[in-house]
Image (tube, rainbow, N blue to C red):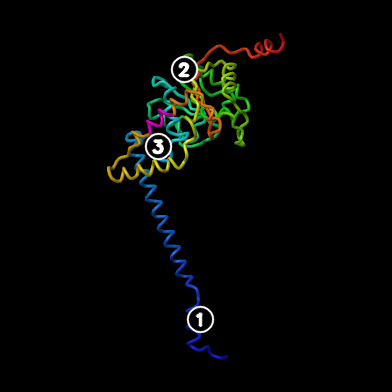
Amino acid sequence: MPSIPRESHEATLAKAPPLPQTKRRGETMSVVLSWLEGRLQQLYGRMKEVYLQERAEVVPAKYRSAFVCVGGASEAQFIIGQMVPRTARKVLIVGPFGGRDFYYLKTRGHEVFALDIGDTGDFDNLSIGNVEEDLPYEDGEFHAIVMGEVLEHLVYDAAALLHLRRVLKDDGVLVITVPLLDDKHCCHVRTYTRRSIVRLLGCCGWKVQQMIERPGLWKWPPALNLLHHALNALFFVVFRRTFYKWSLPVVWRIEYFLGRYYVPLRRFSPGWGAYLCCTKADSTDYLEVNRMAHCE
């Protein structure tokens, strides 16, 4: 077998691409990025903990982002907090998935209960059931009920509203949130407008005391949340505290103020919807309304 000249062998090796070195560089970059991501997550977690202070003991770490983000998060907590009286001792959350309303109301000192169709997380006093069927609670048991983004998922929405009416005290409040004209999600089987949701509530024995539309003007872009967190991170590194407690309330109040007024532009925004605060009332006789409209 002929031997390969040493010079030719060394030339062949010199021409070979440095694959092992490239691979090492890629692995190094991956390790650096992974380390950086971990450090940023630690920083973000610490920022939320410092902002929440003693409330952090009540809210598990995975549910704390709702308190510092905007766009269906902290501003929703603020608006719901304006509708649920602080004197409401027992509060029922229908559909606590995500923990936004459940843990917010717990931090305010309410005794919070939850109802859902499955075990959706770390919620105390959770009952498994369907709000469209009879509820496992006594008549007039709750001072307030919050049902966020649930009604549009129900085939028997009127039945659910009647069941909630039974378990709410006569002077209690029902707070619901619904999307408006949104049939895109595969789980949405009901589509509401400003008028139709008020009519449905009236037929089920509810009077709408207040309606706040969302968003204030346009849905909060995720990039603004990222910028807000980045600026808070820089502030935290320098001063060991965040400025969430000053910046977030400004956004909340703007959203709350603008939401009280009808803004036509809003209907073109993703996330168009409404918060409704309701109290018990005499039911609208929808059959009589139809007779008067079509039979006379």
The reply to whether the magenta stretch includes residue 226 is: no
Residue identifier under label 1: 12
Q: Which of marks 1 and 2 is nearer the N terminus?
A: 1
- In the rendered structure, find residue 68 and report the number of the disc placed on it: 3
Q: Earlier in the sequence, mark 2 or mark 3?
A: 3
Q: What element carries label 2?
A: strand
Q: Quadrant of residue 58?
A: top left
Q: Which mark is in front, 1 or 2? A: 1
Residue 162 visible? The answer is no
CA separation in Å, label 1 and label 2: 85 Å
Residue identifier under label 2: 172
Pick the residue in front: 47 or 234. 234
Query: In this picture, which residue range is highlighted in magenta?
Result: 248-254
The reply to whether the magenta stretch includes residue 251 is: yes
39 up-or-down from 195: above or below: below
Q: Please tell me how crowded label 1 is: few (under 14), some (14-19), or many (20+) other residues with Cα within 10 Å.
A: few
